Image (tube, rainbow, N blue to C red):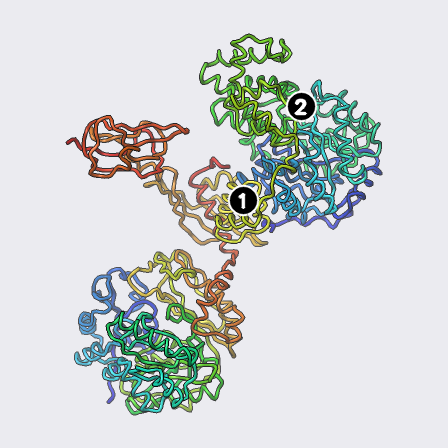
Amino acid sequence: MPRKNQPQPAAAPESFAFVRPGMSAREIVQAVRDLDGVCLTSVSMRDAGQSDFKNRHRFYDLQTLAPTFNEMGLFSAECHGGARWHVGIMNRRESPFEEVQMLRRMMPNVLLQTLIRETNLWGYRPYPKNVIEYAVSNVDIDVWRCFSFLNDVRNMRTVAETVMKRGRLLEPAISFTVADWATDAYYLSVVRDIVALCGGVDEIILCIKDMAGVGNPARISQLVSTIKQHYPELVIHYHRHITDGLGIPALLAAAQAGAKIVDVQEDALVRFYGHPPILGVQAYFEESGIHVHLNRPAAETANEKVREWISHYEWAESPFKGYDHGVTKHRMPGGAFPSSFEQAEKGGFFHLMPAILRVMSLYNQIVCYFDVTPGSQVTWVTCSGIVNRYAKEQGEAGVKRLIALLSKFVEECAQDFSAMNEAEQAEMLQLFRSAPGDFKNLLTGNYGKLPVGWPADWVYQSTFGDEWQAKIAGRTEESPLETLADDDLGKLRLTLADAIGRNPSDEEFVLYLMHPKDAISFIEFREKYGYAPLALPTDVWRNGLQRTGQKVDFMLDGKPYCIELVSVGAEHEGMIHVVLKVNNVTRVYPVATPRAKATEVRMAKGPNDVGATINGNVWRIGNPKRGALHVGDVVHKGEEVANLEAMKMENAIIAPFTGKVAEICVKLNDIVQEGQLLLVIEKE
Amino acid sequence: MQRSISKVLVANRGVPAVRIMHTCRDRKIPTTAVYSTPDRLAYHVRMADTAIHIGEAPPIESYLNADKIIDAAIQSNSNAIHPGWGFLAENADFAQKVIDAGLIWIGPKPEVIRLMGDKIRAKEIAKQSNVPTVPGIENVTSAEQIIEWMQKERVAFPIMIKAAAGGGGKGMVKIDTTEQIAGGLAQARSEAKKSFKDDTVLVEKYIEHGRHIEVQIVADEYQHVVHLYDRECTLQRRNQKIIEEAPSTLESDLRQEICVTAARLMRRIGYTSAGTVEFIFEPSTQSFYFLEVNTRLQVEHGITELITGLDIVSIMLDVAEGKPLPIKQFDVVANRSALEVRLNAEDPKTFYPSFGTITHLRTPLGPNVRVILGASEGEEIPPYYDSLFMLLMASGTDRADALRVMDRAISGDLRLEGIKTLAPLLLSLIRHPKFIAGDFSTKFIEDHMQELVSGFRERTGEDEMLRVARYVAEISALGPQGWM
């Protein structure tokens, strides 16, 4: 359903396209092996936007690159998966299915690539086998880059089988980090598992996923060489973020050691947490004697295209500017950087970021896994939670103490719990008590086994309190593929049908399987606003029309339309009237403002008025002893007349004097604000 | 006796008022509109030459208020009243009052209206005129009585036992076999006793898969009675017609028979002006039975006009002026096929009325389309009156041709915003294979509702444009949103 007037892909001399959709996995692998020099994967349509622009790059703009990509001679274009999926339906209101369909038409020469999180697919929790099979079979993607945040290859089995059975190319990834335990021998064992799972090296490409950008050139060169020594025929694809500032030399080092494919993005897209710039990489590689398979003029055109629209996304850029070599310690992946900082900004704890990053760098030595989705989310929520709690309860000094405590434990005492004094031990045993559920799930093995073993017992004590031994006893090392029972897809589909009032398409159902709440809200949005997310240019999408006479032209189904702003009226009783000329016909749109409701709130003012003491939810009117309260009832001074819940806390509202209830001004489950009138009591 | 109509007061609103004013304008006869308070700015008021306020919103205070309407005619120097359809159209007392006030009544004589308003007498007269009526037997007390009657009158199953005092389905039992008769009779009598304190029951033949066929008649005071062929009004929801076609799908010899039969009945009762004889047709036996006479202009008269090229309202004016019919039976040539759909302001799934403002209205144009519009863009559909606000008709050389035109009219040009209409259901209906094949009965809509509703979701480019425009309006008013 392309809604914009598409430039048709050129009739294609195609001299640069050396792999194409429709080729078998084996043919693609062979074509890469046979290629002179290295080739490139462009992550501009996915990871570039995710790492520096919170995944807000709209298809409207990205599609301008497609005709050029079609001629560029890329190995593949990563345009799907990761968090682009979720942000797409939640924030951009675009469906990943539409994107793939349109890209297929606009760049038929290019292999489309996704990023998939083994059992967690494009969501954040392990899915049962039948959901994985269903979702993977319904997505039209050529190259399936699949990683495990635990490097637990067992978890990839269902994805691998489904992809390979469809004849598509699987690109299993090893999650890469730099740590004393992350040795060549360790990675080789992961590669061995992958090769065994995939039945050899002829139908897969191996990805080394350096999602934080921590592999220094020497380290990565050594790893690639080691793997090549053991598996000379295995094609290696290096994916690396540039957060530490060493992106380009690291890519070159990998290529010199034998990697055949590296990830790049348009130079104009490069900020701080994404990937090396395509033109710079090409120039540097060629200068260093490594040929890059690339239609350079086309790549230059693509870069110019980016310049035309990238200025619309300044608002989405990370507030944390500049490279960060500290990433080698805290290891926050490029993809998680902007969203974490966004949360910190929204949550009002941006100033705590340095402390949180420091705590992360200590935490990831206590609980060892790879900081990439969903692991990076677990790390972030756990560490930011702990730091926030200390800041709230004990202020800045408390945060300093926390860091001192953890530094002493990790750096001085080499994680010997008994070396800590009693008070410190007591504090550490409380550290993870309010950790998020996903952290607990991780410790009990719900995601699979951790790469270098379970954390020490004190972590369990700290997390689970008295239940810690039971939790350890119940911990499983099995893959979630073995432990999770299949979902009832028929029943889930009916639930979705109920929610949207019609039968969902297969694609809508996949969206729902990954993100139930957001998928429904996406479907509802699109029912209401149709193709607005695909048809409107980005400035209008974000800001609307801002002055009288401003027009927006757009295409739907190959036909031109025009909307012109006539006027935006003043707000009156929560309504604004907008007058538009829609294809020359004047239309008036009443728009309700968020203030529409606020104006109706009655506040407690008079002496007989009982008001809300907090912002909260009215979950009881009356009290358990007397039951519900009614108009005309007599209440006694000190008696509870209502109860408000906020943040899971109950707050009793007490009658200030004895009297008769004259009016009850709220209903059960109303959300009330502080001071809002709840009831009126008349003195007897 | 010839009399001249100098000005017509139309005692109606909406579609019928507009329809009658069209012909008056054709004949250069000035018109007077009457209106209730909420109809102050209604389309029919604007269309008339003069307009008189006759009361508040409730029909009883306005459009059913006979005295006020007659006063309005006198006050506005109108010397004739056309009642349209609905409201006072079949009210014999009103017709008499109009005549008594010295005004010309554009419609059948009050005594004929009264006679045909009595359904039992109407059936008796039909029987006397050799018009087949649904076979029945009254005062039934035993099964033998029923069996005897069925043999004598050669009535085939199914039959229906009904409480004589009945209504609302109480005391009604359908019988399919001889064995069921005794039990069914006992049940019907017992239910009748409980519900109406009267166990008198009657038995009638039950018409299965019945189709509703009617014949348009025009007649003058010189005993000329001419039929304008038949119409099919089988597609109904809640006993209200929503799609009509002319001619019906009857075989042409049967059509001849039913039309002549209708004319015979109307001649017999001394009918004048325009009227309709309704029949129920049983396909399995190819039999038709008299139901009733509608002593007024009907909603669906327009499709008869399309297939005959005549103006029925104009003929009514002629007859009211004491002129003979402008045509003889021989002149009436129905050589086309036409279809009408009723655009009611209703939810097409639930049939709940959808009141509100028509924010945008575009009527279909193009070859072979006829529209009668009872309201204009920006008007409000008030909750007090009938939900019909637009009639859409299509014609063609044959039924398939007319269906194609109707499809184009509904799916292509028609555009209505602000209120819900039956349009999606109507489109779904005319596209249904069984409807296209002419294979349907009065129960068709209820039996196929699920299927019909599933055909609703058709997005047009215009809908899509408006979705985008709604988004632009909201963001222009509210600025960037938190969810972005």
Q: Nearer the viewer, residue A481 or B175?
A: B175
**Mark 1 to mark 2 CA distance (whole Å):** 46 Å
User: Mark 2, chain letter?
Assistant: A
- Quarter of the image with the C terminus of chain A is top left
Q: Where residue A464 appears, x then y in whole percent?
A: 53, 23
The image quadrant of residue A595 is: top left
Dot label at residue B236: none
Residue type beneath disc 1: Pro
Q: Is residue A476 left or right of residue B226?
A: right
Q: Is residue B79 left or right of residue A279?
A: left
Image height of A574 relative to A583, above or below: above
Residue depicted at 54% across the width and 49% down the height: A491
Residue type beneath disc 2: Gly
Q: Where residue A682 appears, x then y in whole percent?
A: 18, 33
Dot 1 surroundings within 10 Å: few (below 14), some, or many (20 or more)? many
Residue depicted at 27% across the width and 78% down the height: B200
Q: Where residue A511 appears, x then y in whole percent?
A: 57, 44
Dot 1 or dot 2, earlier in sequence:
2
Q: Nearer the viewer, residue A84 or A636?
A: A636
Dot label at residue A533: 1
Q: Which residue is mark 2?
A: A453
Q: Where residue A535 appears, x then y in whole percent?
A: 55, 47
Q: Is residue A255 left or right of residue A388?
A: right
Image height of B410 relative to A333, above or below: below
Q: Nearer the viewer, residue A377 or B89?
A: A377
Q: Is residue B446 left or right of residue A467?
A: left
